Amino acid sequence: MAPAGGSYSPLDYHHATKHAFGRFARSLGYLDWASQPSPFRRFAGAPLTELPRSPVERDVPYGALFTTQVPTEPITPGTIGEFLRCSLGLSAWKSYGSSRWALRVNPSSGNLHPTEGYVIWDGAVYHYAPAEHVLEQRAELPGTGWESPRDDGSGTSGCFLVALTSIHWREAWKYGERAFRYCQHDVGHALGALRLSAAMLGWRMTVLPAWSHADLSAVLGLDRDEDFGDAEREEPDLIACVSSAPMDSLSLEPWPLVEAARRAEWRGHANRLSASRVEWPLIDDVASGTAGPGGTATTEMTLRPTHYDNDGTSSARRIILQRRSATGFDPRGVLRRATFLSMLDRLVPGVPRGTYGRGAPTCTLSSSSIGCRTSFQVSMRI
């Protein structure tokens, strides 16, 4: 039962879905393989744009991603393809017996991948289909300014928008009522993957919390009942602007795109992912309770350099695309102390150099609004 007001806050949901010593949180209790959801969303009937699979000519060392020294690539179909390939694309296929499944660059709880990616670029809204590495054009948005080339006459855009959504059922199939937390967990993974991919191309990435839940639903076509039918619905999570130039000169207001989306002709119908589903009303309650009204500030995502020695000379693209599930480890492998500390250093911004391992860790809980969803963040000091 939802608290007074009819929807759950993040803390209400957290307490309602915690495991306890005497019981697990509510779920189906077993895996119904007959209803396992497809990991790939498609929009049948949407025009397709094939993306190049070849890498950009210039290779970037991994350590350079955390500096400002990466040369800026122009925003073109080829570099957008590389951006998506190295953030939301497939990293490998695995098989066992008669089963075959894909791994992606962005990690996911249980490899269930509830996160979907969208791009607004060249005057249109596109859904990214990672298995085929194509963009599905959902709608054209003329008259918004986003279809215009750069003033320098290069014929390439100076920026584009990238958005993330979640299909809660993909996680609920396995985790029941706890699925919402795993979806948020996976959105964080995808957001981090997008930022690293942008850095590899010398681009800037700015999250746009001014966009409300309703704004993002309208622009991505998520509120269109006729396009989803009995298919599993998607919940908007966030939208960000990716640019090859500083953000100060860009207009990031949602309303021109929202109005254009409401006038647009939409194409494509979402595929159904499962033959049957189990409903978990608590997930709908917390999704409603955390739907953001939109804010005013923008948040540029910066990657800061580490304080620890780490050569970082390996190819960034190679490291990104070798992402695998951590189901087995080679006992002969060695992780240098400096490398391990540099990884921790990047995860905990603001910690003075050399403070790891000194004193007890402290934990701070704070509320925040990221994109179109209100959440709580835990910060640790080690």
Image (cartoon, helix red, strand yellow):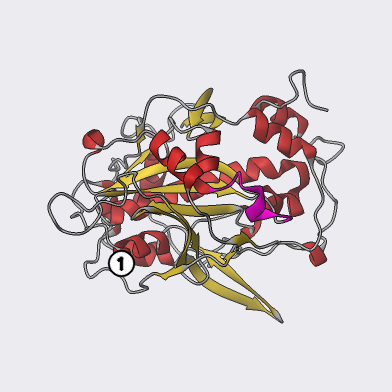
Q: Is residue 150 magenta?
A: no
Residue found at x 73% / y 28%: 15
Q: Observer-nearest residue: 330 or 132?
A: 132
User: Above or below — where is 273 with respect to 196?
Assistant: below
Q: Position of residue 250 (x, y in %)?
A: 26, 37
Q: Position of residue 293 (x, y in %)?
A: 53, 26
Q: Is residue 226 left or right of residue 364?
A: right
Q: Residue furthest left?
A: 152
What count of labels does the image hold? 1
Q: Is residue 224 magenta?
A: yes
Q: Is residue 20 left or right of residue 80?
A: right
Residue found at x 37% / y 40%: 345
Q: Is residue 200 left or right of residue 38?
A: left
Residue found at x 47% / y 59%: 88
Residue found at x 59% / y 65%: 328
Instruction: Check disc 1 and report the residue beneath it.
Output: 78
* Residue extent of the magenta highlight: 221-230
Q: Position of residue 181 (x, y in %)?
A: 65, 40
Q: Position of residue 43 (x, y in %)?
A: 58, 63
**Amino acid beneath label 1:** Gly
Residue 116 visible, this orientation: yes
Q: Observer-nearest residue: 181 or 206?
A: 206
User: Above or below — where is 7 with respect to 102?
Assistant: above
Q: Is residue 378 left or right of residue 182?
A: left
